[in-house]
Amino acid sequence: MFLIHGILALFLLFLVMPTSAASTAEVAELWTGSVYTSTYRIGICFSPEGKVRGVMRLRTFSGAVDVYHFWGAAKNSDVEARHSSGHRFTWRLLSPERVEGEIVLKSGRKIRIDGVRHHNARLAPDDCAPPAEETP
């Protein structure tokens, strides 16, 4: 009888234990695309609570790379984030493979972007930065 109570107690303890770290971990994605004569790589991490953070690397035609760290929130298929300079990013997850969005510069200028989503990306753990792209 004691064995049955012990097993039942362990089962009940298992039911009320916090969920595992895997279920509370961030989801990491890499988004890639081009805008005008530049290419971009966005590393973005989604928390279970709907927070997002990440880094956008924009490689210009000349080869220079501009880096933008951003923070924000996601709800359903919409993502909104800001950079400390005042730039605002809005994205919509169209499908498991596609994302579209807009960057609104602090000047008010709007830039439309379309990209490809790469799931389970290996991003920098501290800021979700995408891996450096190989130079041609």
Image (spheres, rainbow, N blue to C red):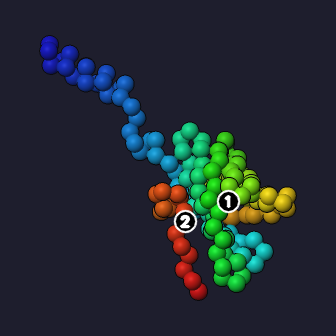
Instruction: Point out which mark residue 98 bears.
Output: 1
x%, y% of residue 38?
A: 72, 76
Instruction: Evaluate whether residue 119 shows in this view.
Output: no
User: Crowdedness of circle 1 by 10 Å Cα count: few (<14), some, many (20+)?
Assistant: some
Q: Residue at x 55, y 65 (%)?
A: 130
**Residue projecting furthest to the top:** 1
User: Left or right: 62 with respect to 45?
Assistant: right
Q: Residue at x 71, y 72 (%)?
A: 34
In the rendered image, the vertical position of residue 121 relative to residue 76, given as above or below: below
**Residue projecting furthest to the left:** 2
For badge 1, the amino acid type reads Arg
x%, y% of residue 28?
A: 53, 55
User: Crowdedness of circle 2 by 10 Å Cα count: few (<14), some, many (20+)?
Assistant: many
What residue would you read off at disc 2? 130
Q: Earlier in the sequence, mark 1 or mark 2?
A: 1
Asked whether the residues under the numbered discs 1 and 2 touch, taking CB atoms below 8 Å apart as contact, a structural biologist would say: no
Instruction: Evaluate whether residue 123 shows in this view.
Output: yes
For badge 2, the amino acid type reads Pro
Element at label 1: strand
- The residue nearer to you, when weighing 102 against 114, is 102
Element at label 2: loop
